[in-house]
Structure formats: structure tokens, C-alpha cells
Amino acid sequence: MLGNIQLLLQIPLLNVQLLLDGIFIGAIFALAAYGLALVWGVMNVKNLAQGDFVMMGGYIAWALSNPKYMGDYAVHPIVGLPVAIVLMFGFGWFIYRLIIRRLVGKDLFTTLLATFGLAIVLQQLLNQMFGPEVQVAESGFQTRTWGLLTVADIKFIAFVLMAILAAIVITFMKYSRMGQAIRATAQDPRAAKVMGIDTENVYAFTFALNAAICGAAGVLISMIWVIQPFFGLAYSIRCFVIVTAAGLGNLPGVIIAGLGLGVIEQYGGFVLGAEYQQAMVVSMLVLVLIVRQIQQSRQRQAVI
Amino acid sequence: MFKITKSLLALTASALIFTAGTASAKVEGDTIILGSAISFTGKYSTNGIHASNGYNLAVKVINKAGGVKVGGKSYKLKIQYYDDESTPARTAQLLERLIKQDGIQYMLGPYSSATTKAAAPVTEKYKIPMVEAEGASRSLFTQGYRYLFAVLSTSEQYLASSIGLAAELAKKAGKKPQDLTAALVFENDPFSLDVRAGVIDDLSKFGIKVVIDDKMPRDLADISATLTKVKAVKPDLLLISGHSKGAATAARQIKELRVQVPMIAMTHCESAKVIDKFGGATEGFLCPTQWAETLSYKDKMFGTAADYDKLFKKTYDGYKNVPYQSAQASAAVMVWKDAFERANSFDRLKLRDALAATNLKTFYGDIKFSKAGNNIAKPMVLRQIQKGKLNVVAPSKWASHPVDFPRMVKY
């Protein structure tokens, strides 16, 4: 461990590499976490199937670029981004009508149990449809090198796309009718209803938007890492850590927490070894919860 | 009410008759029935199907060639399958069912080390011999099982040969093996840790120093931090094992980070299809395999390894390469045939002794069991990706091509 820290001090360029890798991948976590924050904040549903939505997006991109499914119409996996957004939006709406609708206003335990069940069903569905193998969608993009430093183009492109998507979502939430309705419902559903907002519609839209965002994140994950029907859980956990750290309805916080988590994972993996890379994520959650507990007890408020 | 009781009674009666009828199903007429609970669904389904295809092909070929001769009479082979859904607990249940309900006395193994680990205590309890072809974990052969026989090489041998190769190459170049350094990236699961144990043994034998020793969590699909470390430390050898996920992740990130290690060895190159997916960046990877169709093993039933390859592709559609999982499954059925004929009996205890004394040459390799039940006559072979093709480079007895060292990769 000390040797690894020494290495970082001796070759400062390694820090740049870890920072870049962490920030690029953290941007994707941040986006998926923002979706969770929305659903959590607006309708108080803690969605455990978040990571499985991410995997679904990944499989959409992979299937679109795979001649086995598309024949001669196979396209570059990046084309999957808009397709996944549209399909997952529809899917999110469908899941809302089918399941989530019945969970709004229910207690914590019910929502967790129902979305956990949903996660298992989605995993098995993906497994039945695409098989249990680990898959990758190949972007074919190049890698740029500067001496020891390497940046894969796909990671950079993913970062930019994430930034654009985030900007679109923020603008939408701020200025559109629906965005305003979502924020109003989040603040006080009853008042919103009195004001003539169709909250049922707002909930459905919010959940669908979340699924679409996750789908977009999944498309990029399939080109940067690997996808497998049962790998969703790791993303669900990351989303929960980020949202817990940042708090609900705090977009800048979510972005900073997401990027930070990415960087912490990279440093954890480098200094302590890959076996601690994920342990870092969970220990961050513990740390955040302790800090929050102390903060909130000072203000004499209930912990969320 | 009366009606229900009556029909219930009838049902129980018929069930009783049914069980009675099948209780002696080990040999029905002129058919010997083997049993197997194998993964047709769930996470092992792909390889489970490869394995059952191997079993079925061997049964077909043996039956066509006159079947199994016991006591001067020819018997046909048949396999009774159940789907274990890739869950070890289910495998154990289904084996109980095969043995107690279906009366099967001769077992073929399931797919994967995990399910085989669940199966072995059951077959052991009922003293039912089991020939398995798909459970490589070393821990299967340290429990003192007497009825378990495995035709494949155990997992600690998977990457060990690459270390011998590295030492050999170092000596040739006038360097001492002790001056070499190695980086290890292994998944934190029983299989990969077995592979790692074998690697550690061999590394210390040659005095090679381990400079990185990272263990990859099961859910992690990112080893870029570890590979960044590898780039900074510059080891001579990079050894990776973590199923298909580990191989796919490693190949992708080795390409992205342009890792320049002269020798890289990893398991599961083939099942992760790294050549198709990452092309030139995989040049020079060393991939261990249980079996390759280019090896010069042969037997009377299937001919050479290449003949088996041809026959398999002709029988089953959609195979570009014949997976070794299928080849070793076929070999397991051949071991059963050989044991029946040598024992000249259907008595399972006599068959166990006949299995223990197996000394067979097959297209898959030589088969001879140690006391613990693992096959000690067949080495793992090491193939290298050379210009997009997998060529056997070690051990030197079977090598068809010289090894490229350092690996000639152009990113």
C-alpha cells in the first residue's frame, strides 16, 4: 500500500490518469443517480431496479450493434443512445402504470420489496432473452496517448454526452411546463393537485424520465465496461450512495458526489488493490450516513 | 369428498407403481441409463448445453459403433437429464431424485465446479460413481471422495504452465528467472483463487517476485486502476483470471490503456471471445485450454482430435469452434463405456474399482485417475493468440508454433 502511494508521488502523471478515469466514469454514475434522486424526491419511491434499467439500456445498444439481432441493419452502438432513451421512456411509463403507481404513498418497506422484485424479474428477462454471457459493445473509437497517459475516446465522448444530457434535463426541469409541475409535486403533492396539476401524470412522467436516463447511462456503460444480466446491482448501490451523499433535489451535489465517487473508486483500486475498489463505495456510504446523522441530530431533525 | 379421496388413492397407487417400475432403471432391457443434472437454464446454461451436446454425441457414436459390451451382450447407452437451473442446491436435489426415484446408479457430472461440489456429497452418500467433466476446482479433490472421477485438469494447473514458459524464455535470453516480476489480477471467487494458488506455487518455485497482487470483486467490471499500476511498475508477466467477465474487462482495458507487458496470460479468452471483440490488441495473449482440436491425441471411437472437431460441427449447427467443454463431456462418456467393459458387470462397486483403474487414451487426451479422482495423465495446454489465431505454444511436446516473446502487439 505504501509502495503504491510512493508510486503516485514519484510519477505524478498517474494521478492525472486516475482523476480522468474517475471523472469520466463518475459522470455516468452521476446521471443515473440523478434519475434516482428525481424518483425518490418526487414520489418517495426508492427504486432498487435502478441498476437493472442501466443494464437494459446497455443491452439495447449491444443488440442494435449486433448482426445476430439486426442482420444487415446493425448500427454503431452509439446510435443506441436515442433509441434507448425512447424505448426506456416507454418502458418506464409501462412499469409505472403496472407497479409503481401502487407504491406511491406506501411505506419504505413496500417500495423496497416491490422494486427489488422488479429487479429480479428484469434480470431473469435479460437472461432469458440474451443469455448469461458477459457482453461488450465495441465502439471502435481510438485511444489517445501522451506518454504514460491514455484517454480512450469513448470515455471522453461519454463524458460530453452526459454533460449535454444533464444540461437538457436541467433546462427541462427549470423552464418547461412539465418540469415545473414535477417540482411543484415534489414540494407538496396536495397543493399541486389543488392547483390543477395532474399528479398521477407527473409521477408517470418522472418515473419514465428516470428509466430513460438510466437507459442512456447503460448505452455508455456497454461501450466502456461490460454488461451482463446480473451486473445491475453494483449500479443501484452506487446510485444510492451518491443520492444519500448529495441529498434529494440537489443536482450540483449529485454531480459532485458522482464524480467524487468515480475518483475515489479509482484511487481505492490503485492504492489498496482492486478488492477494495467496491468496498470504497460502501464505506463512503457508511461515512456519509454517520456525518448526516451527526448533522441532523444537531438540527433535531429526523434522518431520511 | 369420496370422489376426491378415491382419485387421490388412485393417484398414489399409480405413483407407487411408477416408482416401483423405475426403481431398477439403471439397466432397462438392453439399455444402460446414465443420469445427469445439468444447467439448461440460468447462468451456466451456455456451457451446460455445450456439455450436454458432448455427452449426447458420445452416446450417439458409441451406440452406432455397437454400444457397450457387458457379459457378451451389447447394451445401448442413454442419458436421463434434469435441468438444475444453474443452482447448486437444485443439483443436489435432482441427484437425490435421480438416485432414489429414478434408480440411476451411474452418474455424469453437472456443469461448473459449484454444482459439482453440491453433487459430490450426494453421490458419495449413496455410493454412486460419478464421472464428471466440468468441475475443475481443486477443492473437489481434497475431500477424500471415493466415487468422484474427473477427466479434466484441475484449476490450479490453468496458468501454471505459463510461468514455466516465462522461466524457460528468461533462461534462453540469458536472464535469471529470479529477476522476473509478475503482476496478478484474480477474481475473488473459488475458481480463480484455485488458479491463483497454482500460480503462487509455481512463482515461488522459480523465485519470481510478485509486484502486484490484486483481487477483483465479483461485481466489478473495471480494473483500470490496477492496470495503471501495472503500467507504472512494468512487470514481465501479467496473469489474469476472472471468468468471461475478467477476460473481457481485461482485454478491453489493456487495449484502452495500451499496456505493454511482454507476457500476458489469462483464462477464458475463448469464452469471452476476446479475439472477435478486441482484435489486434489481444495479440500475444496466452490462453490455457483443456483441449484443442490441433492436438495429436486419438482413439478408435472418434479418431483424432481433429476428427472429433469435424464430427461435432457436422452434428450440431452454429459452432464455429468446438468448445473444450463438449470434448471433455464426450470423454467422460467414453470413460464409462471403458469401465463397464473392463468391469464386465453392472455392480456399481465393481464399476467404481474399474473406474479407479482407468488407463485410457482418448481424442481428448490420456485419462488416468489419481487416488483423489482427478485426471493426472493430461496436461493443460497453452495457446497463444498469433495474428488472430489460437496456436498451441506450450508444453513443447504439443507445440505447433513457437511462442512470440515479447508479444508483438501494435495498438
Image (spheres, helix red, strand yellow):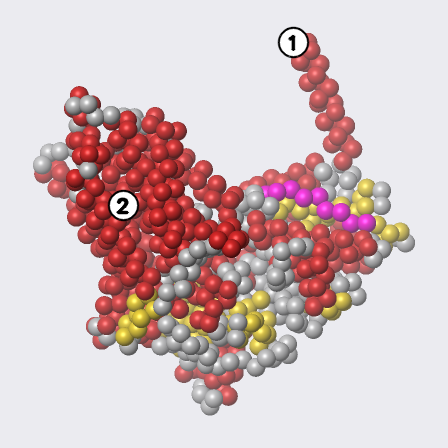
Q: What residue type is labelled 1?
A: Met
Marks 2 and 1: same chain?
A: no
Answer left or right for B18 relative to A274: right
Instruction: Name the secondary structure under disc 2.
Output: helix
Q: Mark 1 points at which residue?
A: B1
Q: Residue A33 carries which label?
A: 2
| Residue at image coords 31%, 32% | A204
Residue B351: x and y in percent read: 76, 53
Kindly indicate the quadrant of the structure image that contains residue B307: bottom right
In this picture, which residue range is highlighted in magenta? B76-84
Queried whether the magenta region covers residue B81, the answer comes back as: yes
SS majority, magenta: strand
Q: Residue B138 carries which label?
A: none
Residue A73: x and y in percent read: 48, 53
* Chain of the residue under label 2: A
Does residue A215 appear in this view?
A: no
Looking at the picture, tell me which residue is in the foreground, A30 or B402: A30
| Residue at image coords 27%, 75% | A146
Tell me the CA gap for discs 2 and 1: 59 Å
Give the mark toward the camera: 2 or 1. 2
Q: Residues within 10 Å of mark 2 (few under 14, many from 20)?
A: many
Kindly indicate the quadrant of the structure image that contains residue A148: bottom left
Instruction: Name the secondary structure under disc 1.
Output: loop
